[in-house]
Image (spheres, rainbow, N blue to C red):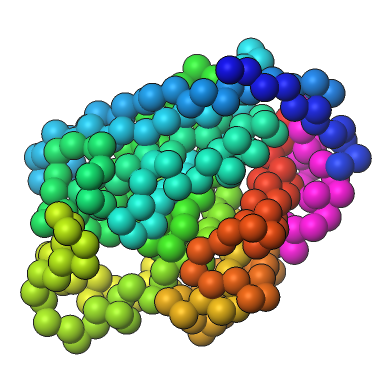
Amino acid sequence: MKKRLWVLGAALVLALAGLCTGCKGDDMKNRVLRELPEEFRYETEYQNHLVDYTDSEGNEITLFGRLCAPLEEGKYPAVILCHGFNGRYTDFPTECETFAGRGYVCYAYDFCGAQAGGRSTGRTSADYTPFTMKEDLRAVISNIKKLPNVDGTQIFLFGGSQGGFVTALTAADKDIKDKIAGLAMYFPALNIPDDWRGKPEVETSPFPGFSISGKYIRSVQDLDVYKTIAAYKKDVCIVWGDQDAIVRREYIERAVEAYGEARVDLTVIPGAGHGFGGSALTTAVQKVLAFLEAHTYA
């Protein structure tokens, strides 16, 4: 099924750009924000897409995900969407359709071993950690950049909760930090190292058929997350609800400090918790869309 979306012109793009407070990077100078045709088409039947790679432990990994992309010919910026704890590739349907309708190639996938009943293969929950998730994301970035309809110079990362934690870590990697056009996160779980610091390194099973292994716990206990993520020097969008009982305000404030206030577009949604629905979801999606468009160039 195909859908037509009437896309607003340059005036709206510039207005959306004005909503971003974290849009001051030097790399934005002398660049022209893009415009889309008045009538723009995108595919609403997501296409299955596999990413195959060998991880650092020699496991043959196949990542299962789905693409939602423009139908018009050309090269487009891409958004890679990363789910949270025990999440799935299906977690961001509103985001995928909204962003694709504005001219982004969107790819959402299952981190391998990071959920019960996931469709990615090659690793179990006993072997997954935030750092195997980083390996997955790096493989996805490499793969998506090579797609014929993707502008490899405009790759954006988006993640929620644990997915936000992993995208923040990945964007800071020395060899790719300058190649990620922007980073957007819902309630990034930067509290994960603190949550496990000093805890017994024993497996726990929060869901049937799924576990948090001692390997996972050991991997994060000594991580200085704020020192790590500060290596990413481009603009960042964070959306957080002030009733979030999992990611407390202090973790968001420390993230803003680590990135630098001038580079962070922070939206706090009153009354929202760890997960957005209804009007909070609408606000969150539109804030991320505004951030993306303010950083996407012709």
Q: Is residue 169 above or below residue 217?
A: above
Q: In the rendered view of the protein, which quadrant contains the N terminus?
A: top right
Question: Which is nearer the eye, 281 or 266?
Answer: 281
Q: Residue at x 17, y 59 (%)?
A: 208
Give whichever of 13, 64 is nearer the camera: 64
Decide which of 254, 259 is in the foreground and name it.
254
Let me know if residue 216 appears in the view. no
* Horizontal arrangement in the rendering, residue 57 relative to residue 247 (left or right): left
Quarter assignment of residue 8: top right
Q: Relative to residue 287, is residue 117 depicted above or below?
A: above
Q: Position of residue 82 (x, y in %)?
A: 42, 49
At a point 31% along the width and 27% down the height, the residue shown is 50
Indicate the position of residue 110 as horizontal and vertical percent values.
32, 42
Provide the residue span drawn in magenta: 13-36
In the image, taking residue 166 as reference, residue 293 lies left or right, namely: right
Residue ranking furthest to the right:
11
| Residue 51, x across and y down, in percent | 30, 29
Indicate the quadrant containing the C terminus: top left, top right, bottom left or bottom right: top right
Give the residue displayed 15% in from the left and 66% down from the top. Answer: 205
Measured as percent of width and height from the top left, residue 67 is found at 47, 28
| Residue 223 forms part of the magenta stretch | no
* Residue 89 visible in image: yes
User: Which residue is depicted at the point 37% across and 25% down?
Assistant: 49
Total tally of numbered discs in the picture: 0
Residue 35 belongs to the span the image colors magenta: yes
Q: Quadrant of residue 127?
A: bottom left
Answer with left or right where residue 88 lies relative to residue 254.
Answer: left
Residue situated furthest top in the rendering:
73
